[in-house]
Amino acid sequence: GTALLPLRRRPARARPRGAPMGNSESGPANEGDADAHLDGEAAVPPGGNPRRRSSRRSDDAGDGPAGPDGVPEENMSYWQMARVGYQELVKAIIRPPRAEYDLNHLGPVEFTFSGRNYVRRDFTLQNPRGHTLECSMWECLSGAPGEQVPCVIYMHGNSSARVEAIPQLSVVLSLGASLLAFDFAGSGRSEGEYVSLGYFERDDLSAVVDYLRDSGRVSTIALWGRSMGAATALLHGERDPSIAAMVLDSPFADLHQLAEEMVEKGREHGIVVPNIVVRIAIRFIRGSVQRAANFDIRELAPVDKADRCFIPAMFVHARGDDFVPPHHSQIIYDRYGGDKNLVLVEGDHNSPRPRFLFDSVAIFLQSRLHIDESKILERRSENNGLPPWVGVRPRFMAAGLSDEDMLSLDFLSTLGLGMNDARQAEMQQALHAMLQPGSAQARGANGAAGP
């Protein structure tokens, strides 16, 4: 059988000669240029003196990890630490680690599910910025020639990829619908240097929706997105009322608000930062992101579109999500213009969703996609969240994930997808490092003891 390779992270791929330059024609040609932006912007960390730069270097190289200019981390000045934290935060926004995966992670090309034969088609599309998007579509082979069926478009979260759609496959296919998943530009195997947390991703989604409508094989379309994918659905839904339904799992209401809330977490850990330092820090980040990736983080506010969106929507959020807290969904829900429902589940931002949620989603999609009951397969709740081919034990599983992994609702966590705990901790540490100088100044001004 084909070996199922372990997922690993990799930096953004080098762009072929003549390929598009990032998410913007005016953006830097590669990540090195982006780093140059960050270096220049971060020369004066938030809370530092713009007329002075720390040039302190260690006389003893030591064995610790090196900071900027080769300074061991334990001997880095506050300002050098702030610079590193600043750069890491900007990269976390526009260039998080890519999810690298093998096509075998998408499962068998052909399989049988509940007595029907299905196929996965892999293909590419081009977004309006000229980036190639890697796509997969799972559909039934048993339909009549020319028959139109509903389709659900699944959109992954940040630092993830289309393989994230696999737990949703069983419930969607059992409804008699097809499912299309794709890697956003800058994510997974698609082209693009940067991600934009929904700002340009909505144009990727537009390209996918146009493809489905032009194909003549699709009747109604629903959107199912998680985190960045949910924000993308909201930003697109406001301008495309023909979408039949949306499942919105863990969307953020306003990126600027989310950044301020991350600062508040820092205060809970003893980092007392004056508000003016926070404003300066966010302004610096905003400028670097805008120059490198050509979008304004202040314009990333899906909640501002909510009252102009009338597509029936099902909001989902985990009670234990402390990365994008549940009140973000509540804020959007309260302002949402269309029919709506909010379901709170146990878990956190990146945890697998409980099986009962898939039953609720199935009922919601069946009613909103106008699915003929004769097309619906007999569903078993114990299959919720599992790949539809698990029961047929395809050969590709033999050399890859164990049966225990595949039969666990948490099997995708072994692939390191999304904003997992490690990635969230890295972002929080970068924020703390960036704001620590301002915190130290604040303690000094108040006569408090230093760290």
Image (tube, helix red, strand yellow):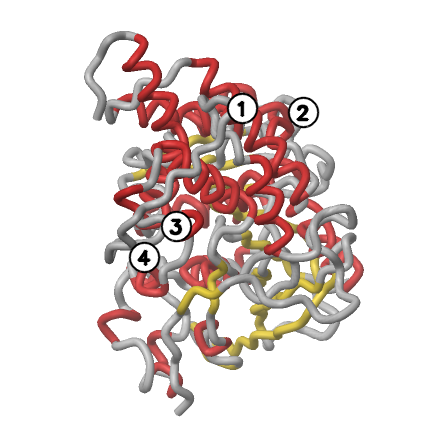
Q: What residue is shown with label 4?
A: 381
Asked whether the residues under the numbered discs 3 and 4 touch, taking CB atoms below 8 Å apart as contact, a structural biologist would say yes
Q: Earlier in the sequence, mark 4 or mark 2?
A: 2
- Where disc 1 sits, the SS reads loop
User: What amino acid type should be assigned to the residue bearing mark 3?
Assistant: Phe
Q: Nearer the viewer, residue 392 or 252?
A: 252
Of marks 1 and 3, the one in the foreground? 1
For label 1, count other residues whose C-alpha is less than 10 Å away and answer few (under 14), some (14-19) or many (20+): few
Would you say residue 332 is visible in this rendering? no
User: What amino acid type should be assigned to the residue bearing mark 2?
Assistant: Arg
Asked whether the residues under the numbered discs 1 and 3 touch, taking CB atoms below 8 Å apart as contact, a structural biologist would say no
The quadrant of the image that shows the C terminus is top left
Of marks 4 and 2, the one in the foreground? 2
Q: Left or right: where does residue 173 sit relative to residue 316?
A: right
Q: Left or right: where does residue 382 sit relative to residue 141?
A: left
- Where disc 2 sits, the SS reads loop
User: What amino acid type should be assigned to the residue bearing mark 4?
Assistant: Ser
Residue at the location (75% across, 70% down)?
17
Cα distance in 3D space between marks 3 and 4: 8 Å
Q: Earlier in the sequence, mark 1 or mark 3?
A: 1
Cα distance in 3D space between marks 2 and 3: 27 Å
For label 2, count other residues whose C-alpha is less than 10 Å away and answer few (under 14), some (14-19) or many (20+): some
Q: Earlier in the sequence, mark 2 or mark 3?
A: 2
Percent of width and height locating residue 243: 67, 43
Asked whether the residues under the numbered discs 1 and 4 touch, taking CB atoms below 8 Å apart as contact, a structural biologist would say no
User: What amino acid type should be assigned to the residue bearing mark 1?
Assistant: Pro
300 to 364, vertically: above or below: above
Residue 358, numbered circle: 3
Q: What residue is shown with label 1?
A: 50
